[in-house]
Image (cartoon, rainbow, N blue to C red):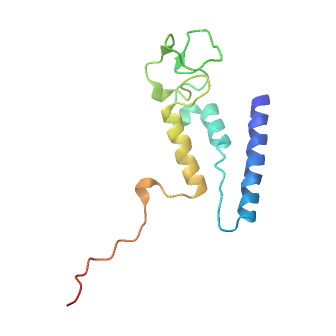
């Protein structure tokens, strides 16, 4: 609960700062990608997003849950794509991809494969 409150407070302050920067620097625009809601939804409803596990990491030290990242003596899960967390701190590749795609959608950016760029003009030979 304490960590979540810190994250929400940080996100609120950062969003406010980005808005102030955009106002103070009219030739620049800033957007804050607040991922709290999507990360919380993935953790709370892992099956909805294709995960089987959101309460333990894929890479762990057995039943010992130290505040460590993955180390050489750690044991790995069989299918990391089914885990929300890679280690105690970091989302798995699958979770990161889902989170990034949701932020891209929320911020209104085009998907890399969804470019609606105009077609280039035809090459016209110079007239002589």
Is residue 122 shown left or right of residue 18?
left
Q: Position of residue 46 (x, y in %)?
A: 57, 32
**Viewer-proximal residue, 51 or 3?**
3
Q: Residue at x 64, y 32 (%)?
A: 44
Q: Quadrant of the C terminus?
A: bottom left
Q: Residue at x 59, y 26 (%)?
A: 54
Q: Where is 95 relative to 18, above or below?
A: above
Q: Where is 128 relative to 25, above or below?
A: below
* Badge count: 0
Q: Based on the displayed image, in which of its 4 quarters is residue 84 positioned?
A: top right
Q: Quadrant of the N terminus?
A: top right
Q: Position of residue 43 (x, y in %)?
A: 62, 32
Q: Where is 83 relative to 117, above or below?
A: above
**Viewer-proximal residue, 110 or 42?**
110
Q: Taking the image as drawn, is residue 78 in sight?
A: yes
Q: Position of residue 87 (x, y in %)?
A: 56, 23
Task: Identify the residue at the far front of this view.
Answer: 128
Q: Where is 30 relative to 77, above or below?
A: below
Q: Based on the displayed image, in which of its 4 quarters is residue 39 positioned?
A: top right
Is residue 74 shown left or right of residue 6?
left
**Viewer-proximal residue, 9 or 78?**
9
Q: Residue at x 64, y 49 (%)?
A: 33
Is residue 26 shown left or right of residue 49?
right
Q: Taking the image as drawn, is residue 1 in sight?
A: no
Q: Position of residue 83 (x, y in %)?
A: 52, 26
Q: Residue at x 64, y 14 (%)?
A: 66
Task: Identify the residue at the far left of this view.
Answer: 128
């Amino acid at each position: 609960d304490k960590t979540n409150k810190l994250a929400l407070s940080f996100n609120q302050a950062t969003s406010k700062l980005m808005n102030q920067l955009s106002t103070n620097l009219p030739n620049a625009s800033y957007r804050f990608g607040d991922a709290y809601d999507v990360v919380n939804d993935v953790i709370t409803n892992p099956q909805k997003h294709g995960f089987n596990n959101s309460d333990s990491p894929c890479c762990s030290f057995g039943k010992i849950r130290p505040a460590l990242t993955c180390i050489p003596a750690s044991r790995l899960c069989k299918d990391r794509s089914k885990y929300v967390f890679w280690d105690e701190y970091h989302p798995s590749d699958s979770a990161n991809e889902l989170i990034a795609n949701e932020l891209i959608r929320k911020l209104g950016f085009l998907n890399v494969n969804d470019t609606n760029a105009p077609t280039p003009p035809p090459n016209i030979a110079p007239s002589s």
